[in-house]
Image (cartoon, helix red, strand yellow):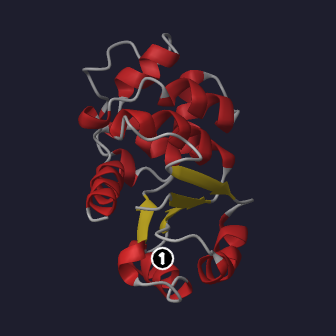
Amino acid sequence: MGRVIFLVEEESMTETLRVLLPKVLPDWQESEHWLALTHRGKSDLEKSIPRKLKGWNEPGARFVILRDNDGGDCRQRKQRLRTLSSSRMEQDVLIRIVCQELESWFLGDLGAVQAAFPRAVRNPNRVPERLRDPDSLTNAADELARLTGTKTKVSRAQSIAKHLKPEANRSVSFNHFIAGLKRLVDSA
């Protein structure tokens, strides 16, 4: 199997992948097995998809497109990304919508938030009502900034990602991403 190329909208997702992927796929090495191409937001990501997928000339390469939902219609977003990626075979492209934003994945594992920022969460086993369904939060980034006292997305992602336990995350979109990635890798 060729490398898996991740097309992501921001640096904090790339930093999360750098820490998360070795936990999910322990034998994977960055640049040998995967590569993340960071974009400057959703518009930049979407503009680059057709060009990158059509022009990528690496045998066996597969792609994962990760984009925040940001309160939109998940099905419409996914269909738009599918249309943008139509130059590739469907089995070569995995599209995952992060509901609602990357920070929802972090709030899905309050133990990781507490490990990175000990004062942020008193008891990670007692999940406040507002955080029980992290994918439904329309303000996950604001909520995480409030909990941690850190507004810098990249450093916050680096700190929390190293403590994530993929098997214990309450975020449905996170779990769909992990399951889809494993299927993509196993199908090669």
Residue 58 is left or right of residue 25, and the answer is right
Residue at (59% x, 47% y) in the render: 31
The percent coordinates of residue 100 (x first, y second) are 46, 56
Residue 56 is left or right of residue 135, and the answer is right
Classify 19 as above or below 102.
Answer: above
Amino acid type for the residue under numbered disc 1: Arg
Residue at (51% x, 27% y) in the render: 160
Q: Which type of secondary structure does the marked residue at label 1 adopt?
A: helix
The percent coordinates of residue 54 (x first, y second) are 61, 84
Residue 64 is left or right of residue 124, and the answer is right
Residue at (48% x, 10% y) in the render: 118
Whether residue 80 can be seen here? yes
Disc 1 crowd rating (10 Å Cα; few below 14, some 14-19, many 20+) is some
Q: Name the residue under label 1.
A: 77
Residue at (42% x, 84% y) in the render: 89
Q: How many labels does the image show?
A: 1
Residue sitting nearer the eye, 128 or 158: 158
